[in-house]
């Protein structure tokens, strides 16, 4: 790796290699301090950002941050790089790339065409020299549309994952939350459950129950049990009605090994889900979650800053054409993102990088109770993501996940974002909500004194 330098005033800052330069250029966050890779001062950070801005984009094709020989994610990034798509920006520096992205001539079709030529490291690099408004503006210009039983990511839309987690996986408790969420227009991205008891038998039980609800009421959405990929493969082999395959992923081979996965296993799961042919309007069958700090927490970051490691996870996701990807941005804790300011910045960085790389990116706008953050910070991030064209957010009763014990966005929060920005759910789901008299053509929710008959009957069965 080459050494880099930049002078600020009379002082010259030296950066020993590209990995060091990228880390020092990153806006301050607790995880990079924990890893010992952060800039020592604001002045050093500015020097690194200025040196990074002058760097040719081609540097990232020749000077890898994680060794090619020992990391399958690096090999994926380099070996599957689309040189033809990259040609449009090949001549640019990182700073020029920022200006190009922000220019009026670069619109949705241009960004879609160049996406296969952008590597995660290029996306991470340019994000480090961008203000929040830059991250919002460029992400808004990126449009990524995916399909399974409905169409996710269309213009003027915001989808939600209905997350009916229960601390004992109680069927009535799960069903009650599903009902509550549907009545607030939540669930078009996915009805997705984190099981409290994580084994194949429980996965089959829950996914079968969700399938029965979706089928009984003709809901144009998809279900997912957020279990390990090997459990989902086993459930498919036993005939379970699996819609989406879920897996948490990270940006280095070693970090993915800590999750018990590799590219080969993910490909096996992808093929297994495709073989079921359960989609009605498309065949995007994967759902991935990511989050800054996962590689460091597994001692698998190779000295790379956490935001660049996060962006590298998007190369893994991109390979498998997912229906959904989201960063669980504040969930890993204050050791990695200390407070609301860091969580907000990280969420917008993740969304920008993933959309730039061509992914249907959502965000779990969340924080843990021991972080220096609160619901006001989450309102700010949710609003900024709404402005940025975020694909989907979470929907949970009262913002409080009683199984995972963290704070995220509620059904009401999603309605707020839709109303402020004039957004609707996925069109197929929107039509179903209107047919069920939950939504109207000109308003977002209409509950009145009586519930639609099917849901009134469902409530009676649960009571």
Image (cartoon, grey):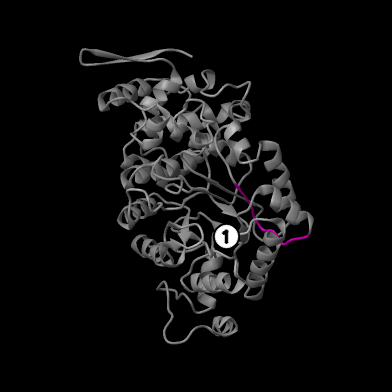
How many circles with numbers are drawn on the protein? 1
Residue 308's place in the image compared with 438, above or below, is: above
- Residue drawn at 42 percent across, 24 percent down: 92
- Residue at the extreme left of the image, as rendered: 9
| Residue 137 appears anywhere in the view | no
Query: Where residue 204 sits in the image (x, y, percent)?
Result: 71, 62
Residue 55's place in the image compared with 254, above or below, is: above
Where does label 1 land, which residue?
Answer: 192
Residue 67's place in the image compared with 145, above or below, is: above
Could you say which quadrant of the image residue 172 lies in? bottom right
Is residue 309 found inside the magenta-colored segment of the image? no
- 210 on left or right of 395: right
Q: Which residues are magenta?
A: 239-247
Q: Nearer the viewer, residue 146 or 416?
A: 416
Prevailing SS of the magenta stretch? loop
Residue 250's place in the image compared with 402, above or below, is: above
- 186 on left or right of 281: left
Image quadrant in which the C terminus is located? bottom right
| Residue 202 appears anywhere in the view | yes
Query: Where residue 82 sits in the image (x, y, percent)?
Result: 59, 29
Is residue 243 found inside the magenta-colored segment of the image? yes
Query: Where residue 416 sits in the image (x, y, percent)?
Result: 36, 64
């Amino acid at each position: 790796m080459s050494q880099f330098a930049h002078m600020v005033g009379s002082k010259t800052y030296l950066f020993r290699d590209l990995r060091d330069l990228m880390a020092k250029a990153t806006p301050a966050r607790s995880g990079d301090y924990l890893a010992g890779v952060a800039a020592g001062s604001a002045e050093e950070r500015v020097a690194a950002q200025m040196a990074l801005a002058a760097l040719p984009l081609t540097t990232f094709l020749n000077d890898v941050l994680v060794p090619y020989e020992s990391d399958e994610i690096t090999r994926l990034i380099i070996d599957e790089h689309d040189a033809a798509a990259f040609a449009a920006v090949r001549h640019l520096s990182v700073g020029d790339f920022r200006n190009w992205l922000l220019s009026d001539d670069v619109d949705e079709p241009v960004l879609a065409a160049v996406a296969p030529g952008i590597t995660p490291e290029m996306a991470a690099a340019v994000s480090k020299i961008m203000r929040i408004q830059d991250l919002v503006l460029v992400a808004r210009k990126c449009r990524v549309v995916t399909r399974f039983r409905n169409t996710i990511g269309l213009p003027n839309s915001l989808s939600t994952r209905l997350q009916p987690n229960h601390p004992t996986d109680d069927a009535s408790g799960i069903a009650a939350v599903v009902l509550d969420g549907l009545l607030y227009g939540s669930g078009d991205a996915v009805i997705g459950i984190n099981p409290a008891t994580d084994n194949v038998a429980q996965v089959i039980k829950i996914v079968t129950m969700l399938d029965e609800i979706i089928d009984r009421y003709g809901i144009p959405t998809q279900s997912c049990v957020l279990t390990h990929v090997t459990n989902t493969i086993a459930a498919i082999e036993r005939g379970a009605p699996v819609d989406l395959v879920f897996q948490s992923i990270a940006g280095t081979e070693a970090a993915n090994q800590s999750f018990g996965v590799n590219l080969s296993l993910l490909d096996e799961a992808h093929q297994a889900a495709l073989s079921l042919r359960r989609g009605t309007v498309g065949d995007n069958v994967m759902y991935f979650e990511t989050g800054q700090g996962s590689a460091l927490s597994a001692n698998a970051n190779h000295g790379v800053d956490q935001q660049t490691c996060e962006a590298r996870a998007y190369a893994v996701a991109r390979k498998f054409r997912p229906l959904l990807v989201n960063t669980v941005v504040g969930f890993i804790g204050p050791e990695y993102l200390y407070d609301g300011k860091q969580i907000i910045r990280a969420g917008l960085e993740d969304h920008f990088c993933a959309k730039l790389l061509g992914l249907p990116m959502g965000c779990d706008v969340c924080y843990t109770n021991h972080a220096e953050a609160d619901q006001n910070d989450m309102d700010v991030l949710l609003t900024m993501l709404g402005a940025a064209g975020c694909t989907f957010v979470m929907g949970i009763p009262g913002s409080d996940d009683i199984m995972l014990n963290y704070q995220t966005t509620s059904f009401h929060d999603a309605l707020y974002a839709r109303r402020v920005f004039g957004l609707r759910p996925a069109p197929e789901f929107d039509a179903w909500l209107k047919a069920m008299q939950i939504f109207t053509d000109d308003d977002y929710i209409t509950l009145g004194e009586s519930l639609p008959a099917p849901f009134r009957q469902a409530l009676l069965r649960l009571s």
